[in-house]
Amino acid sequence: MGGGVGGSHVFISWFLEFVPAQNRGTWMVIFSLFWTLGTILEASLAWVVLPALNWRWLLALTALPCVLMLPFFGLTPESPRYLCVQNRMADATAVLERMASANQSDLPPGVLIYNRETKTDHGNLASESECLLPVRQKECKVDDAVSSESGSLAALRTLLSRDLLKSTLLLWFVFYANSFAYYGIVLLTSQLSDANRSCASGVIFGLHQKDTNIYKDTFITSLAEIPGLILSAVLVDWFGRKASMWSMMFACCAFLGPLVFHQNELLTTILLFGARACAMGSFTVLCLYAPEVYPTYVRSTGSGIATAIGRVGGVVCPLVAVALLGSCHQMEALVVFEVVLCLAAVACMFFPVETKGRGMD
């Protein structure tokens, strides 16, 4: 699943190259809506299948949409930038002509020019239109003075260069913290109910205990992602990317705060509903912000590495959500989530670039 999730972020980075700045927030919310629908359907599937059958049936039914999706990759156009890097100018021209035709416009006459960038400068980077348009001839000019380093190593060096170092390190931490919080809240949905009952009675419930309330609570909190997406759509273009992220992270902290102490099941579900809405909203804006920060030639690498570091947070969070709650340390577990989220919100304030309304370099 982790690889598939990472692939979705690469797809988002690719797609945003085709979307004007004023529409990127809307399209990002639309894409995230399908993630949310999948989450709701999976929770519904678990609610129905697991009590009647077993986890093998759940995995098999979950895999079906992935198999059905494979034929559609043949219909997906390749990135013109990638084709130009590979010196496949005829293919790049064909993709651009399809884009122009879909938008009922014509490509301007001229020669396709591609200059391989070797230095990052947010103020002086050529725009995508300058590099790829005008297009008519199947020709590409590549700078021969490019370093012999592999593309991945060169991209990593660029990400850690003086111009991008601050953005890169802050993005890595915020991705880690946001994934830690998001997946932690998903786990808290089931773990808090069990912890409250077991710690109150002094009996530790078995890991294989079946409780349909878990699936019901997971389904309800999964629905929270829909208002979270609506909230992010409203905030992202009104207040900007940075303010949207830190405000929703602080709101998530506010919802999780009362859970430091034991609450009844209804209040716990309501608080987790609000926390998950804010976590999903901030994560959506973060996935929009990361590709906008980086120039095209390191965009996929930068977003991909940040996403991978975020998955580390998803791996670590069960050690808190499950281990601490299982040993009746609810206060300590929630304090860890609060601290991580607050630090991530502060990190968002220190992002050096606000990308609202900004063209993608």
Image (cartoon, rainbow, N blue to C red):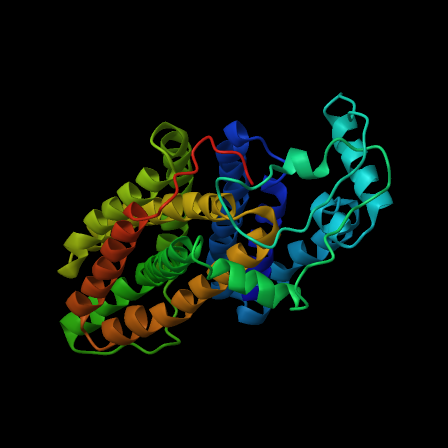
Image quarter in which the N terminus is found: bottom right
Residue drawn at (19%, 74%) of the image: 328
| Residue ranking furthest to the front | 145
Residue drawn at (26%, 63%) of the image: 192
| Residue ranking furthest to the top | 104
Work out whether residue 252 or residue 149 is closer to the camera in this orientation and state it.
Answer: 149
Q: Position of residue 48 (x, y in %)?
A: 50, 57
Q: Position of residue 212 (x, y in %)?
A: 38, 60
Q: Position of residue 27 (x, y in %)?
A: 54, 35
Q: How many marks?
A: 0
Residue drawn at (37%, 73%) of the image: 209
Work out whether residue 142 or residue 184 is closer to the camera in this orientation and state it.
Answer: 142
Does residue 1 appear in the picture of this structure?
no
Residue drawn at (61%, 40%) of the image: 17
Q: Examine the rendered structure and indicate whether residue 77 appears above or below residue 6.
A: above
Work out whether residue 187 or residue 3 is closer to the camera in this orientation and state it.
Answer: 3
Image quarter in which the C terminus is found: top right
* Residue 264, quarter of the rendered image: bottom left
Does residue 202 appear in the picture of this structure?
yes
Work out whether residue 55 or residue 314 is closer to the camera in this orientation and state it.
Answer: 314
Q: Position of residue 150 (x, y in %)?
A: 66, 68
Q: Examine the rendered structure and indicate whether residue 166 appears above or below residue 239.
A: below
Query: Is 345 on the left or on the right of 38, as rendered?
Result: left
